[in-house]
Image (cartoon, grey):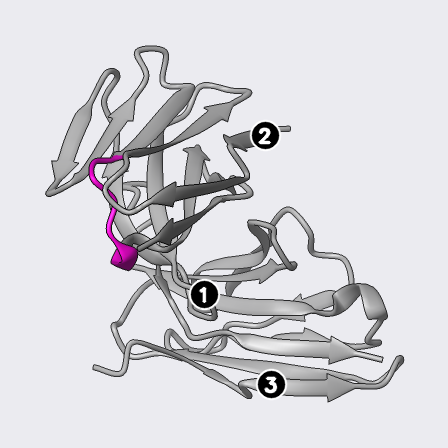
């Protein structure tokens, strides 16, 4: 079955440093979504990527979908303490949507 | 709009007990989902529904049942609680699945089975 792997599992950065999390699927995806979950909270939708090679930006966040539509990345430039949380990718293939295990980001002020 | 609401927020069950986790959305969404999230892990889909009267199994359906008698409500039933069902349960809804519409999540129900 479809598997979505996400790395790294944890990332601790100094405030102002950059951060990247990677998502890899065992199968070609229809689309990929990214969510952020604050500690003790629920997942909140960030963005959806659909097209091969697509790149989208949200302020300091840059999302990329691979050419083969099997991998994706989220890059945060100059992290802030408000970026703390766990970032999940969710890959969809037909009606099957699988979440990665998430990357937990901590930011030291 | 209240969005997606879940009750209870927290529950402790003894092994073998049963309970129903409630989920309601007021956004007139067709699609609703139940996920479980184990500590330090991602979300795993238990069941989903594409509309009233229609439900389907997700990745980890064993030990659970659902029903969808109305567009708004999607309760999740645990018949014989087991320690392996200790988890945080999230309900979510979306307008459409094929267009990849964003899922809106409820605040979650923390379940502890002892």
Q: Residue furthest right?
A: B16
Query: Would you say B53 lies left or right of B71 here?
Result: right
Query: Would you say B51 lies left or right of B15 here?
Result: left
Q: Residues within 10 Å of mark 2 (few under 14, many from 20)?
A: some
Range shown magenta: A76-82
Residue A104 vs residue B11, the one in the foreground: A104
Per the model, the C-alpha gap separating discs 1 and 3 is 16 Å
In this rendering, the label closer to the viewer, 1 or 3: 1
Residue A3's tag is 2
Circles 3 and 2 on the same chain: no
Residue A51 location, x and y as percent? 23, 22
Per the model, the C-alpha gap separating discs 2 and 1 is 25 Å
Q: Which residue is mark 3?
A: B10
Please indicate, yes or no, whether residue A43 appears anywhere in the rendered image: yes
- Residue in the image at 37% along x and 63% along y: B93
Residue A41 location, x and y as percent? 42, 69
Residue B22 location, x and y as percent? 53, 82
Please indicate, yes or no, whether residue B103 appears anywhere in the rendered image: no
Q: Which residue is mark 1?
A: A39
Res. A30 image quadrant: top left
- Residue A12 vs A29, above or below: the answer is below
Per the model, the C-alpha gap separating discs 3 and 2 is 30 Å
- Residue in the image at 43% along x and 45% along y: A88
Q: What is the tally of numbered marks visible in this picture?
A: 3
Q: Chain of mark 3?
A: B
């Amino acid at each position: 079955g479809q598997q979505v792997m996400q790395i790294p599992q944890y990332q601790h950065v100094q405030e102002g440093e950059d951060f990247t999390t990677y998502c890899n699927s065992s199968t070609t995806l229809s689309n990929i979504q990214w969510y952020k979950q604050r500690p003790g909270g629920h997942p909140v939708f960030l963005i959806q990527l659909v097209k091969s090679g697509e790149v989208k930006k949200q302020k300091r966040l840059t999302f990329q979908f691979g050419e083969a539509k099997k991998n994706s990345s989220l890059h945060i430039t100059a992290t802030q303490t408000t970026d703390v949380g766990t970032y999940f990718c969710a890959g969809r293939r037909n009606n099957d949507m699988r979440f990665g295990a998430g990357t937990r980001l901590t930011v030291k002020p | 709009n209240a969005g997606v609401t879940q009750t209870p927020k927290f529950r402790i069950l003894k092994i073998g007990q049963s309970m129903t986790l409630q989920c309601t959305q007021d956004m007139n969404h067709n699609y609703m989902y139940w996920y479980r999230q184990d500590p330090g892990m991602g979300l795993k889909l238990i069941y989903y529904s594409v509309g009233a009267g229609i439900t389907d199994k997700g990745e980890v359906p064993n030990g659970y049942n659902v029903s969808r008698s109305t567009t708004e409500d999607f309760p999740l039933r645990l018949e014989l609680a087991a320690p392996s069902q200790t988890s945080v349960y999230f309900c979510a809804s979306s307008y459409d699945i094929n267009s990849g519409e964003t899922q809106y999540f409820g605040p979650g129900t923390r379940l502890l089975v002892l």
